[in-house]
Amino acid sequence: MRAITEEKFEELLKFMEEKEIDVLMIMDTEYGKNINLHYLTGHPDSAIVLLTRDGETVLIPGDIQLAEKYAEVDEIIDLRNYDLNFHMAIKDFVENRWKKSSLTFGVHENILYGTIIKMKNNISQLKFFTDPIQITRILEKLRSTKSDYELNQLKKATQISNKTIEDIKNFCINAKNETENDLSFLVRKKMAEYGADDVAFESLVGNTSRSHQLHCYPPASNQKYALQGLALIDFGAKYKGYCADITVPISFGNLAEEQQRMRDFVIKAYEAAIEIIDIGVPLWKIHEEGVQMLKKGGYDLPYALGHGLGLTVHDSPLLIRKPSDEYSLKHWKEEYVQDGMVFTIEPGIYKQGLGGFRLENDVMIKNGKVNVITKSEHLNF
Amino acid sequence: MRAITEEKFEELLKFMEEKEIDVLMIMDTEYGKNINLHYLTGHPDSAIVLLTRDGETVLIPGDIQLAEKYAEVDEIIDLRNYDLNFHMAIKDFVENRWKKSSLTFGVHENILYGTIIKMKNNISQLKFFTDPIQITRILEKLRSTKSDYELNQLKKATQISNKTIEDIKNFCINAKNETENDLSFLVRKKMAEYGADDVAFESLVGNTSRSHQLHCYPPASNQKYALQGLALIDFGAKYKGYCADITVPISFGNLAEEQQRMRDFVIKAYEAAIEIIDIGVPLWKIHEEGVQMLKKGGYDLPYALGHGLGLTVHDSPLLIRKPSDEYSLKHWKEEYVQDGMVFTIEPGIYKQGLGGFRLENDVMIKNGKVNVITKSEHLNF
């Protein structure tokens, strides 16, 4: 089943009409991920989709059996007929099906540069729409508000994640020599038991010596977890493809004064940001609200305050400052909180030696109401 | 520590000299993965590296603390000085450090198209080397043979994987109602116990109803694993970043005649391919050897017979047929088995209703000898 609604699909076709794009090509591969493919077709794996201006969808999948099971498209191409070479398949379509002397292909910014060069070399009829950022933006815009079906799946993903917080608590209460890996396994196992397809991403489990890392590397280790100081776990369930994302800040024992101050400023920044979320509020203002509160304490935020959730854990919208370079600014349009949005709020402070403190919850806007749908809070043991 | 040897690094600089490329830019992001960044710098996470023709390396990482710990480069740029905008950082380098009126940047095929367009718009001094496939190819060539250090890490990854086969056997012997997910968890847990950093990729666990999928989706499910018929598990350990990759074909109970025939042809294809591997043999001939044997049985192989192993589970070289389109053929060069190569051999046959049978082992070429270093074989229970 494809997630995009009929109404949004029409909006996309209208965009193609206005921009004189004949074929929209979205490609999702191991090296160039693009969730729009899943969103537009329901196919959850590597493939290319060609969408014509009159709404015809042609899928060129890596795994045809999988496509036959999941994809909602007009036609599925068997790559074995083209020596497993998708360039040949597209060339055949352009030359023998559409028979146009010139065709304008629209592609997403995230397509691989090598693919474009190769297509230009192989298929002389092709022209590329010159502004791929516009294609990225329209798809981000469509994905940034969710249908009721999507909201329900996201709700389920967050419920599974919330339930798992209880298991994390029990782990911490009883923790002796258990490692970060032990906690990572536990979370994975519990979420599967509660009905998750999978983890939304590899859980980031940092004890006091690793929690200062923005993105723990490796995600979990064989170090003991329950050590005096600031720890955290950043995790989420995937349910029917939809991703939740939570960070629980955890501490063991008494905190030093500076660690308490970090904690206090993160919580203040979190609360200030949550407080101003409302229909119609510009997204960059929410980011700024969190950032300014951290600045009062002398801290900075080295990333966006929040990001959308959907078929990927980093979906649109992005809650970030206005762009600073001319090109991006030219393509930038102020975005506002709208019904159907689901995004994280995740301020954090990170100091090598002191550790990291990040609080992250998921916010859903539904029927005009702002709901914090996950239940992360600072846990002390 | 960077994995590339000094000798290979010099070869890369010589290539840049010949092609008149001033700066090689490699970019690895969430949406455009590129293992060359890790290979050239030791940095295991999202970043951009700029390599000048005289061998200077400048890293622009997403996580600067991680870079300070892992990267072996001349300089690390703090993106917070550029409003977290890497285009501004590169612009500053071009305008204020290198001060050239024109600079030719070489980029890999896997860079995102949107990045190229944006850089062209933002930095007027930039020219791009017109043939990114040549950059992909030289890096593939360098990575396709491993140093002794790399071979040792790969050996360790395969040893961990081999040891785990015993746990899989025990699981199957005792299996009653255990699910695919149970087996997936077990394999993950055991490999961590044996010293793996992580799984090399999410294990693909298919029971008889799912083993016909080329790439099980979801990777594992809550279906019972030990059901009459053909099952498989495709898994591997990651050790110090290096990846192993094995598929164990598993059956429960007696096989139907057609299933036995599938099994026999896969094993014949596997043995035929292994048999002809030797220093100097063209890689496409090994692929063809396997394919032709499958064809004798009336089966086709819908993918490449094998792929290299290294810092990514799909490393170079690729054991595949010669390319079929002009553009690729023009850039194609026959490659041969060489000392230091490590690759999989993985023929398979897949039939909905009958299941799938894939046998996959890892081959290492060292000191002129061909060694099958993993121990997968058909297991019947």
Image (cartoon, coloured by chain):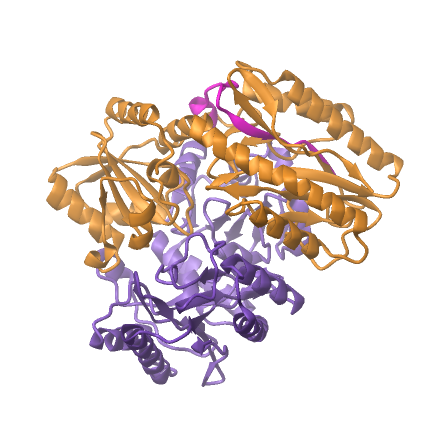
Chain colours: A orange, B purple
Report the residue at 51% width, 59% height from top.
B179
Work out whether residue A59 or residue B255 is closer to the camera in this orientation and state it. B255
Seen in the picture, residue B245 relative to B371 is either above or below; the reply is above
Q: Within the image, what quadrant is residue A290 found in?
A: top right
Seen in the picture, residue B140 relative to A21 is either above or below; the reply is below
Please say whether residue A348 is one of the residues in the magenta stretch.
yes
Residue A217 at least partly seen: no
Q: Is residue A168 left or right of residue A137?
A: right
Give how far across and how far down residue A144 sits, in percent.
46, 27
Which quarter of the rendered picture does the C terminus of chain A lie within?
top right
Report the residue at 74% width, 30% height from top.
A266
Work out whether residue A110 or residue A188 is closer to the camera in this orientation and state it. A188
Q: Which residues are magenta?
A: A328-350
Please say whether residue A333 is one of the residues in the magenta stretch.
yes
Residue B52 at least partly seen: yes
Q: Is residue A271 left or right of residue A370?
A: right
Q: How many marks?
A: 0
Give how far across and how far down residue A333 sits, in percent.
46, 20
Give how far across and how far down residue B234 sits, in percent.
46, 65
